[in-house]
Each structure stands twice: as C-alpha cells, then as structure tokens.
Amino acid sequence: MADAPQPVMFAVVTVNRKAIGGGMAPIFFADDVAERDRIAMWLSRITNCIVHDLHDGSLALTVNAVPQSSSSSTQD
C-alpha cells in the first residue's frame, strides 16, 4: 500500500562499505553498481519495496508499514 503512513527501512544495498555502518536493516554489499542495481531490483520484485538512491553508492529499500487498527471487527 503506497499511501501507508510510516515507511520502514527494509534493507540497504551498497558498493560503498564506508557509507553504511550498521543498524536495524540488513546490508547487502555489491562489488559494483551493476551488481548493486541487480540485487536491489530482485529484492524490490520479491518484496514489493521501494528503492531510494542515496547518491553515495547506496540504495535504501523501504516498505510502508501497515496501519494497526485500534478496534477489531468480527463478521457473523
């Protein structure tokens, strides 16, 4: 759902090992830009995530969090 209120970092794909220093998202290191783009493409196809270019050799992949409903509904 593209209009969900909260984007969540899913993963990072990078060719620049110094640009990314850990965190909650898994990091995929690529040897070159072509490999980086290929990894990001397949992850986005598999997970339906959005790819953002950070312009430092890294791509951030995000998914939108599903809003939690405060009330549960039951169908009879």
Image (cartoon, helix red, strand yellow):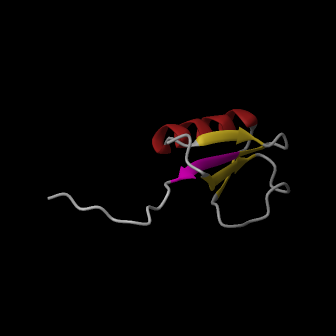
Between 14 and 64, which is closer to the camera in this rendering? 64
Residue projecting furthest to the top = 34
**Left or right of residue 43: residue 24:** right
Between 70 and 32, which is closer to the camera in this rendering? 70
**Left or right of residue 57: residue 4:** left
Between 14 and 6, which is closer to the camera in this rendering? 6
Count every numbered label the image shows and give the total. Answer: 0
- Spot occupied by residue 65 in the image (x, y as percentages of width and height): 54, 55
Of helix, strand and loop, which mostly describes the magenta segment? strand
Figure quadrant of residue 49: top right
The C terminus is located in which quarter? Answer: bottom left
- Spot occupied by residue 2 in the image (x, y as percentages of width and height): 55, 40
Residue at left 50%, top 56%?
67
Figure quadrant of residue 71: bottom left
Residue at left 50%, top 41%?
48
Vertical placement of residue 62 versus 18, above or below: above
Q: Which residues are magenta?
A: 60-65
**Left or right of residue 30: residue 20:** right
Magenta span has 52? no
